[in-house]
Image (cartoon, rainbow, N blue to C red):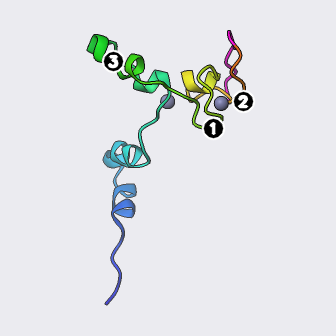
């Protein structure tokens, strides 16, 4: 019995499924990706504590946007540097 292609391989062959593949890698938890201002007080970016996935600091620039470099610091007023 031969093994067929995995679901991931099937999706990778189909450019239209690129979005599905992205969502399979897990939703990003940075503020910019989670932010849903249209939800008002239900906005997950307000309700949840969004931490940097690397250093787990709330004020790390990476917690604001995944495109910023992780500073490993929880200092106030940090300016994010693009990676
Ligand atoms: Zn993100
Ligand atoms: Zn960080």
List the residue tagged with mark 2: 72
N-term mark: 2 or 3? 3
Give the dominant element type of the magenta stretch: helix, strand or loop.
loop
| Residue 37 location (% of width, % of height) | 34, 12
Say if disc 2 is inside 8 Å of ligand 2: yes
Q: Which mark is residue 43?
A: 3
1 drawn magenta: no
For the residue pair 28 and 60, the one nearer the viewer reads as 60
Q: Is residue 13 left or right of residue 82?
A: left
- CA distance separating discs 2 and 3: 26 Å
Seen as rendered, the residue at the extreme bottom is 1
Residue interval drawn in magenta: 76-83
For the residue pair 57 and 81, the one nearer the viewer reads as 57
Say if disc 1 is inside 8 Å of ligand 2: yes
| Residue 81 location (% of width, % of height) | 70, 21
N-term mark: 3 or 1? 3
In the figure, 61 relative to 7: above or below?
above
N-term mark: 1 or 2? 1
SS label for mark 3: loop
- Identify the residue at image location x=66%, y=34%: 55
- CA distance separating discs 3 and 1: 23 Å
SS label for mark 2: loop
Q: Crowding at label 1, few (<14), some or many (≥20) Cα neighbours within 10 Å?
A: few
């Amino acid at each position: 019995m031969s093994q067929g292609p995995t679901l991931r391989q099937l999706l990778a062959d189909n450019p239209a499924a690129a979005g599905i593949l992205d969502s399979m890698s897990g939703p990003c938890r940075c503020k910019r990706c989670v932010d849903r201002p249209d939800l008002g007080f239900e906005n997950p970016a307000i309700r949840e504590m969004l931490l940097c996935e690397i250093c787990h600091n709330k004020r790390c620039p990476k917690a604001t946007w995944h495109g910023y470099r992780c500073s490993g610091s929880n200092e106030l007023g940090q300016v994010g540097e693009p990676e």
